[in-house]
Image: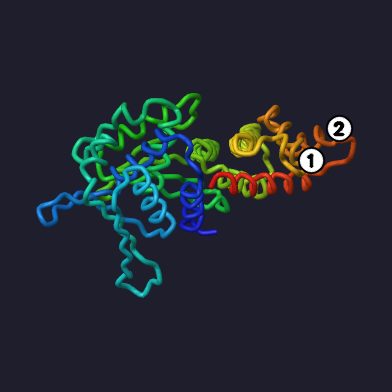
Amino acid sequence: MKKDSFTKKVKEELVSNSYDSFDRLRALLAAYIRINGSLIIRNKSTLLSLKTENAKISKFLYETISEIYKTKVNLITNKKANLSKSNNYIIEIEEASEEIIDDLDISFVEGKISKNIVKNDDTISGYLAGAFLASGSINSPVTSNYHLEISLNNDNFAKWLSKLFAKYKNSNIEPKIIKRRENYVIYFKKCDQISTFLIMIGAVSSCLEFEDVRVTRDSLNTANRLMNMDTANLKRTLETGQRQIEEINVIDKALGIDNIHNIKARELAKIRLENDSASLQELASILGEKLNKPITKSNINHLFRYLHELYLRFKK
């Protein structure tokens, strides 16, 4: 796997995540716009322009900015001049450009990062995710040359961004800064720090793949690797449980849990509300004991798909 392909996988996971925290999403946008955005004067109006070569990132930016700021956003696709089949995507915001810059407290001149945007671990995670989306890259875990970097065009901004890592609770990441031609690059090479960073920014599946490849390639299973994998799995379980609880609450409000026709789904909904962090296997055991019959993880998955379909029906 090439460096570019794993970087792409991480970034596309970030834009496919759901962001329940509004402040985290604003922090992500603030970082991306600060790094990849530019202000253009056109027809005596100020226009905010964002660029990317990734179609999924462009769609994410388009939908997110449109939804948050209720403004018209133009998405322009340009073919590259060379023989490459890839495109350039340009997102342009004209009517609300100044409002967005003010709301996200962005300065393209100063290197400071606003405390109104990064005020806790959640928003620091969002900001770092946005910075990686904008100009980050990571080596494939297949190689033993572990390397993750974020390239910036401002020395002061690079220093401020590097300080965010130390402000994140229990962070073990100690980035370094080097100048490469006209850019200032924040980077770190330790594999456990890269895993921590991937979990921090919400790229849980990518972290699991990174660790899995490392474990397969390297026979030395250290405690840090296992801890990172356990943390990633636990985070995924908790996030899935929280989403299921939110969907069940919608069903309960619209229909009432006791009115769910499918008996197994009805009991599973009640069990999930009482066990928000239980794994699928644990839920299967609890439901099996309650119904006095064997229940498998596959049964639980099928029942949650049934509940999800109910949720989609009542959400409308």
Q: Amino acid at mark 2?
A: Glu
Residue 277 location (% of width, % of height) = 67, 30
Judge whether 160 appears above or below 300 on screen: above
Residue 177 location (% of width, % of height) = 34, 38
Left-right relation of 127 to 97: right
- Give residue 289's mark: 2
Judge whether 203 appears above or below 162 on screen: below
Residue 209 location (% of width, % of height) = 60, 48
Q: Residues within 10 Å of mark 1 (few under 14, many from 20)?
A: few
Residue 310 location (% of width, % of height) = 64, 46
Q: Amino acid at mark 1?
A: Ile
Circle 1 residue? 263
Quadrant in the rendering for residue 154: top left
Judge whether 92 appears above or below 249 on screen: below
- Residue at image point 51% right, 59% down: 2
* Residue 258 shows in the view: yes
Left-right relation of 253 to 40: right
Quadrant in the rendering for residue 264: top right
- Give residue 283's mark: none
Nearer the camera: disc 2 or disc 1: 1
- Residue at image point 59% right, 45% down: 314
What's the image's color scheme? rainbow
Q: Nearer the viewer, residue 280 or 248?
A: 248
